[in-house]
Amino acid sequence: MQRPFKSLSRSLRQPFNRLYARHRLRQYHSRERSLEEVVDWAMHFGGYGYMTVQTLQIPSEITQLAKAVQAIKPKIIVEIGTARGGTLLIWSYLASQRVITCDLNDMRRQKPLFSQFSPPGSQCQITLLSGNSHDANFKARLARELNGEKADFMFIDGDHTESGVEADYNDYKEFVRPGGLIAFHDIVEKQPLSTNQVFHFWKRLKLGADVQEFVADPDQCGFGIGLVRVPEA
Ligand SMILES: C[S@@+](CC[C@H](N)C(=O)[O-])C[C@H]1O[C@@H](n2cnc3c(N)ncnc32)[C@H](O)[C@@H]1O
C-alpha cells in the first residue's frame, strides 16, 4: 500500500512533472528525426514520476527491429506492454495510421503525454488500452478498436512467463495481417529473473518459421529480440 505522504508528495509534484514532460516533447518535435534519433529519444526522453518516458532496450537490437518494421511501411501497430512508453515513441514514429498499446497499468495519467507522441504532421492516432491481455474481454476490446482492420506489426512485451507469452501470441496473432511481423522482447536464454521465460516459447516457435533474431551479444544476460513473419498464405 502506498503511504499517504508519498502519495500526496507525488500528486503535488505532478504539475511540474507534466510541464517538464511537455518541454521534452516540444524539443523532440522541434525538427524531423532520423530513426536512430528516435530510438535515442525513446531511451533518454527522461522525466519524473508518472511522466517518465523510458525503455530498457539494447540500442542495436531495437534499431534493427525498428528498421525491419519501417521496411514494411506499417499503417497499424499493436503493442502488448507499454510500461513507460519508450517503445511506443518508436512505433508512433513508424506507423502512418494507428498505434494501439496495451498494459495492465492504468495509463490515464500518461494519456495526455503518450497520445501526443506522433511527429508533427503525422496522421498516426495513439490509443492506450489498460487491462490484462489474458482476459477474453480485453481481447474483445482490441478487436473492437481494430474494427476488422489488421495490424502490420505487433510487439509482444507484456507477460514474460512461458505460458503468458505463448497465450499472447496465440490469442493475438489473428490481428496481424498475412506478411506482417510479430516481435518478442527478451528472447535470450540467460536471464536475470527466473520469470523471464520468453526463450522457452521462442525456441519452439522459431522451428520452421520465417524468423530473425536481433541479439547484440550471444553471451548477454537478458533482452534480445525475436521477429517472426506471418506467412502470406
Ligand atoms: C517490459 S515492460 C514493456 C516495456 C516497453 N515495451 C518498452 O520497451 O518501452 C512490460 C509491461 O507489460 C505489462 N504487462 C505484463 N503482463 C501484462 C498483461 N498480461 N497484460 C497487459 N500488460 C501486461 C507490465 O505492466 C509492464 O508495464
Image (cartoon, helix red, strand yellow):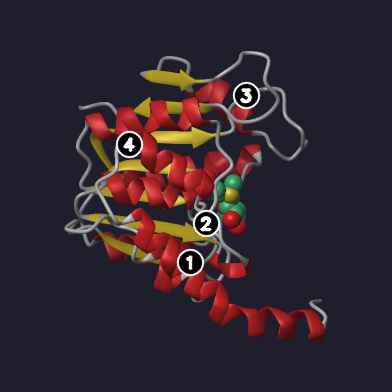
Q: Nearer the viewer, residue 4 or 195?
A: 4
Q: Which residue is mark 1?
A: 21
Q: CA distance from mark 1 to mark 4?
A: 21 Å
Q: Which mark is residue 53?
A: 2
Which numbered disc covers residue 188?
A: 3
Mark 2 closeness class: few <14, some 14–19, many ≥20 residues within 10 Å: many
Amino acid identity at mark 1: Ala
Location of the C terminus by quadrant is: top left
The residue sitting at 23% across, 41% down in the picture is 74
Residue underneath mark 4: 35
| Residue drawn at 50 percent across, 74 percent down | 18
Determine the secondary structure under disc 3.
loop
- Amino acid on which disc 4 is placed: Leu
Q: For the residue marked with disc 2, what is the amino acid? A: Val
CA separation, marks 3 and 2? Answer: 25 Å
Q: Are marks 1 and 2 in contact (CB under 8 Å)?
A: yes
Q: Eyeballing the image, is 230 above or below 146? A: above
Marks 1/3: CA–CA distance: 33 Å
